[in-house]
Amino acid sequence: MSTNTATADPASHRLSDTLREAASKYGLIAVLLALPVYLAISDLISKGNLTDLGNNLVLGLSNGAIIALVALGYTLVYGIIELINFAHGEVFMIGSFVAFGLWGTFGISEGMAVPGMIVGLLAAMIAAMIVCGGLNVMIERVAYKPLRNAPKLAPLITAIGMSFILQNVGILWRGSSQASVPDLINQSNDLVTIGGVVINNGDVLAAAVTIPLVFLLTSFINRSRLGKAMRATAQDPDAARLMGINVNTTISMTFLLGGMLAGAAGLINLLYQTSIWYFQGFQAGLIAFTAAVMGGIGNLKGAVLGGLIIGCIGQLAEFRIGAEWTAVVVFAYLVLIMVFRPQGLIGEETREAG
Amino acid sequence: MSTPVETPSTATGAGKARTLLATEQVSKTFGGLVAVNDVSFEIPERSIVSIIGPNGAGKTTFFNMLTGLYKPSIGRIVFDGKDISRTRPDRITTLGIARTFQNIRLFATMSAVENVMVGQHARMKAGLIGSILRPPKVRGEERSVRDKAHEMLSYVGLATRVHDELAVNLSYGDQRRVEIARALASDPRLLLLDEPTAGMNPQESDRLTAFMRQLREERQVTILLIEHDMKVVMGVSERITVLDHGEKIAEGDPVEVRANPLVVEAYLGKQG
Amino acid sequence: MSNLRGLLKGKNNLVVSLVALGVAAILPLFFDPLSNLTNNFILAAAFVVMALGLNIVVGFAGLLDLGYVAFYAFGAYTIGWFASDHFSSVNGGEGFHIAAGEFASNLPGIHLNFLVIVVVAVIITGIAGMLIGLPTLRLRGDYIAIVTLAFGEIIYRFAVNGDEITFGEGYKLTNGRQAISPIDSIDLPGFAPFDSAFSLRPFYWFCLVLVGIVLLVNFRLRDSRLGRAWIAIREDEVAAASMGVPLVKTKLLAYATGAAFGGISGAFLGSYLTSVNANNFQFGFSIFILAMIILGGLGSIWGVAIGAILLSFINTYFIPEVFNEVPRKIGLEFDLTILNFGIFGFLILLVMVLRPQGILPERRRALELEGVGAGDAIEVRAP
């Protein structure tokens, strides 16, 4: 750009744009930090230490890891076809159901030898991933593909229909009340204590499954042919089609990947929460969607970051305000973010999200 | 930006036409990208003025600022003595600026008449309660708005038998007509036409050119035109402003602009 | 010519409306005044009011509101607060009464006449509609859906946990799942007090009047300055704004009008069911109402009314009374009632994929669903 402008200085308004952008981004960060900082100060005043906060954050990060896996499914699908896959939370729920249903088949029970249990759980997880991946692909075929040329709200409505159908599958499968499942990994066993902050078995499990999966997924999308096709389709489906990319297959594969992650999350959730319920997917889905939006929907790193943050916020709200208000806090954050910073923390990697 | 608006007489020099719209050093940036940079220009009342420039020169962005769809990053836009730089699009329409779009944006599932009735929205009064209770005043307004819509459609040359046809079913030429009628329905003092002859054959373009003159004579409308068809531009405009890369590179009457080496370079450079 | 046609169409519509309402009014005379069928008619009528309210938001203005249950809740709590003994020690235990009717006039708590309640409910839900609509104004369709859903869920949680929130002389915000009950019955000036132990017919006829009002409002608004502005916004916000349609005001009016009918119907249901229970305000209810609109035909007034009646009867009659035993007959160990939301979900899916324009399509919406106009216009950055 030439600099022959006499009076108006382009640099100055570029600066003001930058400032506004920074204000909106750091404003969001400030709002996110407000709750933990407030709690930290009040803890320091009343108890003189930050042990509670530390414990909350550890639990929050573990919760957040599970949320992140579900959030990745939202973000992958939104990134590629700009659809909020409302049934995704239910796919996660089905993942839990499948995994739990297979415990008996794989001979998994409390008090069995550790190596056997690891092999069994791994098998159950893979099975849940396959079922959920397939289910998600089927959902796309049945409920979204026929509406690809309809107004954008049409597939969102069928997605809600699908979500209700799957919830009812859950009711038929295991009834309508919440049930507890055996605590296989002794999840609340204190493994390590650092300065009063406890890390237990469940936390280690959440990290041990999530980190490799996220790493695998990102490197798959960055390196593989299919990953490249996905990114190309996300950028511009028509151009991708012209370049010889099979857009339908690519979309199906995206749903497959998202569903697999939800399946894995389903198993971890089972072990971590030691409970199972047909309704678990609805709230988890909304929370994970909040996470995806918070990070910047369409952005993989954002979904993970958002998941961890929302996990911590949820945990803090549950511990300090009461579990019955957690959803209110999370949804309030959802509204705030969608209204004031719809592009999220990191912003979009793919298409315009705001 | 506290400088007062220049008085019309000094602006045009001629002293007879006052300035209807003026932009003062207007710029628009998107992120880091400068789409319009420091453009000042004026439209004298009851004139026909054009903005030309190669693709991506910032013409439509400029239009969008005049109609309030974008707010200028810096600079002022003054319409009829009022600063409209931060005014909402619908308020700007109420003040007297109407537009058409480069790629026709009619309300596809509404009939031609209904489209033009929407164009009169700002001139109507019926509110929520009035619309529900429909007192005689509202009925009367509705009737006169419908009559005026038919009148406008006939004025732009739409055959009566297609007045109630859905916009989506109209021919391309008729859609352009309806769009102009819809814009005129708000009784604008300034009409912005964004490439109105796109997709028209030479005869149709000629007819539209004549129609623009007729509009000015009969309805006292000032017209600002974005146009690619040089024959139309040179034929109808009294003044032409040339944008390139978001900046004003030339201005003047058709003869001056045609002779300006910068303009030639901008166009040829684009091709070469 | 077209004026004449418009008038004729209007007259026809009036005739159809009057005949339909007339037939509906005679209907309960064929059944026992306390029959369960009359109860089903009443619920169907109340849902028609809600569905036609939501139709203004979703069908006319094109704003996908997934949190409509919030207005049901606001309407229901309006009557819960102001026509029961919830605020029992108001006025030193004497209570506060406005034309409350013979029975309620001697009770503690606030007791307003139902007509006053309707006015209050319209005001409260209208304002709530605008407040919830406000943050969505600059958002695109799918984000609007999620934000309204989130609001709906927030209101639901407040309803459920409202018994933890106390103020004044130990008053609870809500009674949560314990429900605020009993609620005053409807007592209109010039009519005998409604008594559900004696006859359900007055409730039905009253609700039918509400249906008449909501039909009138729908028809009038559809063919008005505002109705055209809503279609314009739905199809192309940028073009609409450029034609002089104020986006904020026009959208907020849609939210407020739609919300008001949710509130009226909510207040009516609160009185008819004589209790206001937080359990009724779940997300599923929003989808129940949305499904009526989709089934009937987005934006189609008669279609939505038919969709509402149909789904209401599926919910209150066909699932629990006609087909409930079907699973057991084929050897499955469950009642069909536990699957009602799955059935609604399935209906939504089926209609959307096979006949997105619904039972009785609205001309414009049918075109839009085929991909004409609407929705995918170029986005202009929010100013």
Image (cartoon, coloured by chain):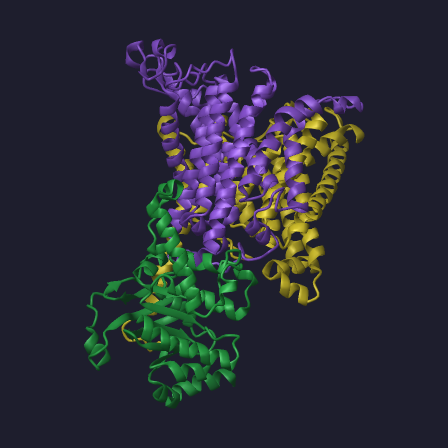
In which quadrant of the rendered image does the N terminus of chain A lie? bottom left
Q: The green chain is which one?
A: B
Nearest the eye: C356 or C196? C196
| Horizontal side of residue C240 vs B42, given as left or right | right
Where is residue A49 drawn, in percent x and y? 41, 30
Q: Quadrant of the rendered structure where residue A112 is?
A: top right
Number of labels in the image equals: 0
Determine if residue A92 is in view: no
Determine if residue C25 is in view: yes
| Horizontal side of residue A14 vs C357, given as left or right | left
Q: In the image, is residue A127 above or below residue B187?
A: above
* Residue positioned 69% across, 35% down in the render: A94
Nearest the eye: B87 or B95? B95
* Residue positioned 61% across, 36% down in the render: A204
Where is residue C300 drawn, in percent x and y? 55, 43
Nearest the eye: B258 or A231? B258
Where is residue B92 drawn, in percent x and y? 33, 60
* Residue positioned 48% across, 19% down in the render: C202
* Residue positioned 37% across, 36% down in the render: C127
Colour in which chain A is drawn? yellow
Where is residue C137 drawn, in percent x and y? 42, 47
Colour in which chain C is drawn? purple
Q: Quadrant of the rendered structure where residue C331 is?
A: top right
